[in-house]
Amino acid sequence: EGKIKRLDNSVDKLRIKRKDSDSLKVTENVFDNATLKALYTLSNKGIVQALGGSISTGKEANVFLADGEEEEIAIKIYRISSSSFRSMEDYILGDPRFSNIRHNKRDIVFAWTKKEFRNLMRAKQAGIRVPEPITTERNILIMKFMGENGKPYPLLKDIKIENEDGQMIFETVIDYMHKLYVDANLVHGDLSEYNILIDPEDITPIIIDMGQSVTLEHPRADQFLKRDIENILRYFKRYKVNESPESIYARIKEP
Ligand code: ADP
Ligand code: MN
């Protein structure tokens, strides 16, 4: 109770508007001082205009809806205290883009946030449909909101469709994996029905959650690629997709 009130005061002091009272209850343990400070900066710059409700509470991050400068945005906040610092370190250490960061938890999480931003940018430049990244501030990633009227698009795992549509989505996902590999030189590293949104308008997939994506120089890039392929083939079996992991692997690596 007291904690919520304190937070209420500090959010008010920061003059960050709230769209509903609900969001604060969820944010209670998210908004540590470092995060409040980052939100303050984003609010001062006008990037975050009003904070909306919670979209997701994951293992390492919370995602919120918010009003941006012109449109709805998604705010992904990596928790500094409860993030699995060790596994993040594994992914960061093999990445030449982050060879000189200091090895404390806070800096690793900040680097991780930047890494997701850059990965999304590279994916977008390679022609893959992802939420367009807008900016980062410490442990906060701001990106375009993928949804309509405050309602996020469904995850692949939650939709029911015909085999034909499933096969179409599968083909696009493989095309995205190929572009990601050949043009962006990245492997997603956590690709599954949990990290693919579906735009209901045209049933096209949108790839999300690229914090763990690695460049091809990473010593485990090939292992992650094989795991992504296994996950995708396992899921699309239900839509009568019966390709072998070997043939998909070859397709993705084809120049
Ligand atoms: P986590 O690491 O917690 O899995 P994700 O990046 O996968 O983080 O985001 C968690 C959830 O938040 C997703 O499953 C999706 O429902 C929602 N989400 C994430 N990014 C966006 C976005 N840009 N627009 C709409 N919803 C999003
Ligand atoms: Mn996810």
Image (cartoon, grey):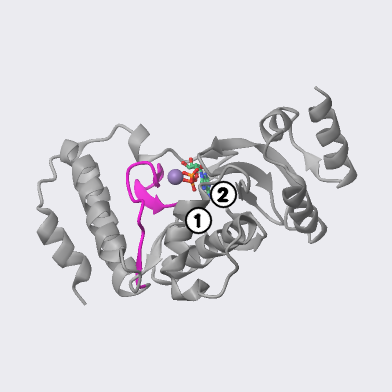
- Three-letter amino acid code at disc 2? Phe
Residue at 32 percent of width and 46 percent of height? 192
Residue at 35 percent of width and 40 percent of height? 156
Mark 2 CB in 8 Å range of ligand 1? yes
Q: Which residue is at the front of the view, 146 or 5?
A: 5
In the picture provided, is 129 more to the left or to the right than 221? right
Q: Is residue 17 above or below residue 219?
A: above
* Rendering coords of residue 230 (x, y %): 21, 49
Which portion, as a residue range, is magenta?
A: 185-208
Confirm or deny contact between disc 2 and disc 1 (CB under 8 A).
Answer: yes
Real-space Cα separation, disc 2 to disc 1, in angstroms: 7 Å
- Three-letter amino acid code at disc 1? Pro
Reading the chain from its start, which is encountered first: label 2 or label 1? 1
* Rendering coords of residue 208 (x, y %): 44, 52
Per the image, the residue denoted by label 1 is: 131
Q: Which residue is at the front of the view, 12 or 153?
A: 12
- Residue 72 within the magenta-colored segment of the rendering: no
Q: Which residue is at the front of the view, 163 or 194?
A: 194
* Rendering coords of residue 210 (x, y %): 45, 57
Per the image, the residue denoted by label 2 is: 145
